[in-house]
Image: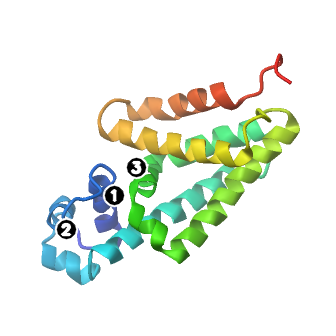
Amino acid sequence: MATDRDSVLEAAVGVLSRRPTAHLDEIARAAGISRATLHRIFPGREALIREVGALGLRRFSAALDVAQVEQGSAEAALRRLVDAVVPDAALCAFLAGENQLYDDPEINDLWELQDARVRALFLRGQQEGAFRVELSAGWLSEAFFDLVAGIGWAVQEGRLAPRESAFSLAELFLGGALRRPDTP
């Protein structure tokens, strides 16, 4: 029986990223524990939601670190980020869909730190001439994160094979973000 925090959080991600309004009973069942055990680990739904959100942001931060987004060409850095973030796409789906997190100042501060790094990557890519300049770096960051979340949902629902997800994300995103030689 899984009773460690990380296992419970992983189970919660699997449930909540597909069904944000799922009851704690469903989450406990997915984790293989009783609702009472779930309450001993997380005192309530709000605490669980916050911990899943914090986990998502920690993993996204780790993906940015692993991808070394500040190094090399922006396009290569983005491809490394795709490879690093796709394994946690379900967490991104959760973050994108959980409105309760927007009311948490600490979560918002963590999100802003991650988003600033992604925006800086896109801005650098625009300055290098790799990414389209008529799309703001902020919008490219938002669109990228939303596509990662979409990958999470598509994989969970069986509409996309996990082994195809990084390729699909990179090709779809870069197909729209890369600057074409014939555009100003």
Q: Quadrant of the N terminus?
A: bottom left
- Few, some or many C-alpha atoms within 10 Å of disc 3 (few <14, some 14-19, many ≥20)? many
Kindly tell me whether residue 134 is visible in this rendering: yes
Amino acid type shown at disc 2: Leu
Q: Which residue is mark 3?
A: 90
Amino acid type shown at disc 1: Val
Amino acid type shown at disc 3: Ala
The residue located at (58%, 42%) in the rendering is: 143
- Few, some or many C-alpha atoms within 10 Å of disc 2 (few <14, some 14-19, many ≥20)? many
Q: Which residue is mark 2?
A: 24
- In the rendered view, would you say 29 is above or below 159? below
Q: Quadrant of residue 38?
A: bottom left
Q: Are marks 2 and 1 in contact (CB under 8 Å)?
A: no
Q: Quadrant of the C terminus?
A: top right
| Mark identifier at residue 13 | 1
Label 3: state its secondary structure.
helix
